[in-house]
Image (cartoon, grey):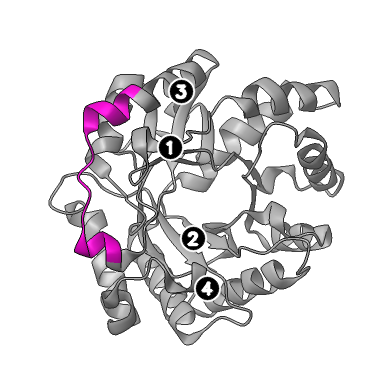
Amino acid sequence: MTVKGPVDVAEMGITLVHEHLYADLRPHAEQAAQPITPDIDDVVEVVLPHLQEIHRLGCRTLIDCTATTLGRNPLLIRRLSDASGLHMVTATGAYVAVGGRFTPPYVVDEGDEQLAARWTGEWRHGIDGTDVRPGLVKLGLEGDPLSELERKVVRAAAMTHLETGLTIAAHIGPWDAVAPGRNARCAFEQLDLLEAAGVSPTAWFWVHAQNETLADQHVRAAQRGAWVSFDGFRPGQVDTYLALVQRMRAHGLLHRVLLSQDAGWYNAGAPGGGEFHPFHPVFTELVPALRSNGFGDDDIDLLFVRNPAQAFAYGTKRR
């Protein structure tokens, strides 16, 4: 489901599965008290050249994973989709990580069924009075163990998936090498909750899996059926990402891997949008490195075309 309506997965082509266009990174309370209305023309002026560059490099779909309370703007995304020629996808869901910085009161006050009804309503009727429908459920979680609020949000995501067939993308953390195993424990607790609700792990993907330093946990999650997303690539990280992907291939799990950059980020609160991270390095640095290290055309197609198409095809995946 793109911001312009449904497309056949065969039309997705080369896909970046986790990027950001426009965001408001102020706490939710500040956003509510002092809303920022973006100057669409200014945003397009900054962002469009980066989109045109990846279109030139062969990319055809970009998944905007900006959460609902981090500045999600479906009409702006559709404007950029029109201008760039790229298919684009936006999200529903709830982001309750980062100590609740972006958590609105309704997520705390409503029950799991109410949240699921809210998110399913966006799927059925459009987001915020528009006709733009979400193409995934984006969660932001960090508990180890999960808090009751986080468990409620996961249950709501499961209900939403069973009603809509939308894939669930779960941001986990942020933790890195100082806390080995925490990301994995957060991930597997979510999978347990989803399976208890009747949802297959194949409907869920582990956002920022590269932050888990216990690589055997990536293997374990993929063997269980989850998508494992290494999606924070930046220039200079070729060796790290190459090792992650090689390990998954060695275990016969390349078909459960997603790759992206978590790049972009026009910041509504910064002059001129602040520093915008380009979208091209995965194509100009990582893909050539993969090819130089024995990944052939079929492997590249699997990672950037077939896996994303399978991951984002909506359809209920029951346990």
Name the spot of residue 218 as percent of width and height, x first.
75, 58
Q: Closer to the camera: disc 2 or disc 3?
A: 3
- The reply, left or right, for residue 275 in relation to residue 8 is right
**Local crowd size for mark 2, using a 10 Å CA cut-off: few (<14), some (14–19), many (≥20):** some
Mark 3: secondary structure: helix
In the foreground, 289 or 202: 289
Among numbered discs 1 and 2, the one appearing first in the sequence: 1
Q: In the image, which is nearer the foreground, mark 4 or mark 1? A: 1
Amino acid carrying label 1: it is Gly
Amino acid carrying mark 2 in the image: Lys
Residue 105 locus on image (x, y percent): 28, 77
Front position in the image: 268 or 300: 268
Element at label 2 = loop
Instruction: Tell me where the magenta segment starts and ends, as one range.
Output: 30-45
Q: Is residue 36 magenta?
A: yes
Q: Quadrant of residue 281?
A: top right
